[in-house]
Image (cartoon, grey):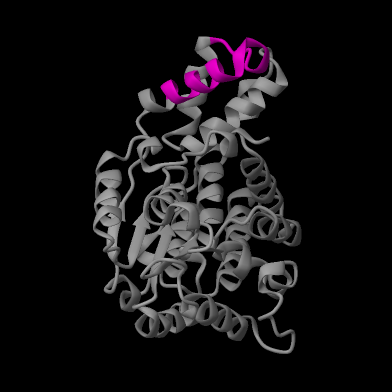
């Protein structure tokens, strides 16, 4: 079992490092007055877990029935293939209609169904920055019609990607990176729970994992499990470079070498197989550029593409254009004189 699931918070009191957020969510739960929300903050800070815990606080035994979570990054990366593989959408899916039409039907259906033993239900969108502008505009209209029976929650690392028409109808709640001491104590607690046989890790190694996680508690727990399963003599540098880091590094290396198609395929892998949004792919590429190829022209290209994606332009078109631009810039750097 993955430790990120085994040690996932089950109540608001178990959310780590977000005291003000927890206080606010508890108030919503106790007053039974939950507004539409935008939960904004870096990855691994507890946004999705907080939604699940809020549902348990509100609905107790009926939390599962009254909470719908839409993995928007998977949905809009995989498209209709995602819907075809999801049994819960099978009765609503229409193969002859567009992805957007199917999306609107699913959201209308789920948001209009009466909640079970409650005044309203919750619908959460993970990776809300992946929602295209057309989908967000449709959501804004559905929000207005369903406000009596459903509250909409948008979880995102990029709140600027949420269109003003939705953001103005939501209360923003901001999550901060988890402080290193809290990450460290959480990892130590997991090691204690697993015992020395399940987690044979030295104190100094935990400190290195905390530094590699940079406030991302989910990443820290994932790295801890990988290290525990690899053995105490494993290479920490290779472990701290996650699979997505490795794919982004391979993508940039291919683009830099002039193999544009291979670079594009690897970036598509990050979106389709790993579920990263366009802006998360940019972040992974940016880390590679800063580490291996710190050229200001490529940094500018990344920043400009990030701005465009923040205004909800087509992710695939923009990333393909970025790949071509990086290839040109890298070729100029290689060209003598």
- On screen, residue 64 versus residue 320, left or right, reads left
Q: Nearer the viewer, residue 13 or 223?
A: 13
Q: Is residue 322 visible?
A: no
Residue 270 part of the magenta segment: no
Picture residue at 62% right of the left edge, 56% below the top: 275
Image: magenta residue range: 184-202
Residue 70 position within the rendered picture, expressed as x and y whole percent measured from the top left: 54, 65
* 215 versus 261 height, above or below: above
Magenta stretch, overall SS: helix
- On screen, residue 259 versus residue 158, left or right, reads right
Q: Nearer the viewer, residue 317 or 119?
A: 119
Residue 226 position within the rendered picture, expressed as x and y whole percent measured from the top left: 66, 28
Q: Nearer the viewer, residue 215 or 253?
A: 215
Q: Is residue 89 visible?
A: yes
Question: The N terminus is located in which quarter?
Answer: top right
Picture residue at 62% right of the left edge, 17% below the top: 199
**Number of numbered markers:** 0
Picture residue at 49% right of the left edge, 41% below the top: 290
Residue 86 position within the rendered picture, expressed as x and y whole percent measured from the top left: 70, 67
């Amino acid at each position: 079992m993955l430790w990120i699931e085994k040690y996932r918070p089950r109540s608001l009191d178990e959310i780590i490092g977000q005291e003000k957020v927890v206080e606010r969510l508890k108030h919503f739960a106790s007053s039974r007055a939950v507004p539409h929300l935008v939960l904004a903050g870096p990855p691994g800070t507890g946004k999705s877990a907080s939604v699940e815990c809020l549902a348990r606080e509100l609905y107790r035994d009926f939390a599962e029935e009254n909470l719908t979570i839409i993995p928007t990054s998977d949905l809009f990366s995989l498209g209709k293939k995602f819907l075809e593989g999801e049994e819960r959408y099978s009765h609503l899916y229409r193969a002859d209609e567009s992805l957007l039409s199917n999306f609107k039907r699913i959201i209308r259906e789920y948001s209009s169904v009466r909640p079970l033993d409650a005044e309203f239900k919750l619908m959460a969108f993970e990776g809300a920055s992946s929602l295209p502008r057309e989908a967000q505009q449709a959501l804004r209209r559905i929000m207005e019609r369903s406000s009596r029976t459903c509250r909409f929650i948008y979880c995102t690392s990029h709140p600027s990607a949420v269109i003003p028409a939705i953001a103005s109808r939501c209360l923003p709640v901001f999550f901060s990176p988890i402080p290193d001491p809290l990450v460290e104590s959480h990892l130590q607690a997991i090691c204690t729970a697993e015992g020395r046989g399940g987690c044979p890790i030295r104190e100094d190694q935990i400190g290195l994992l905390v530094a590699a996680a940079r406030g991302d508690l989910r990443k820290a727990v994932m790295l801890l499990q990988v290290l525990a399963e690899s053995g105490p003599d494993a290479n920490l540098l290779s472990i701290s470079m996650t699979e997505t880091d490795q794919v982004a590094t391979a993508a940039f290396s291919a683009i830099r070498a002039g193999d544009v198609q291979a670079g594009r395929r690897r970036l598509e892998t990050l979106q389709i197989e790993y579920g990263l949004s366009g802006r998360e792919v940019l972040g992974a590429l940016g880390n590679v550029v800063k580490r291996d190829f710190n050229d200001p022209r490529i940094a500018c290209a990344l920043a400009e593409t990030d701005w465009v994606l923040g205004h909800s332009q087509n992710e695939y078109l923009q990333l393909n254009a970025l790949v071509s631009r990086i290839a040109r810039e890298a070729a100029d750097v290689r060209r003598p004189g």
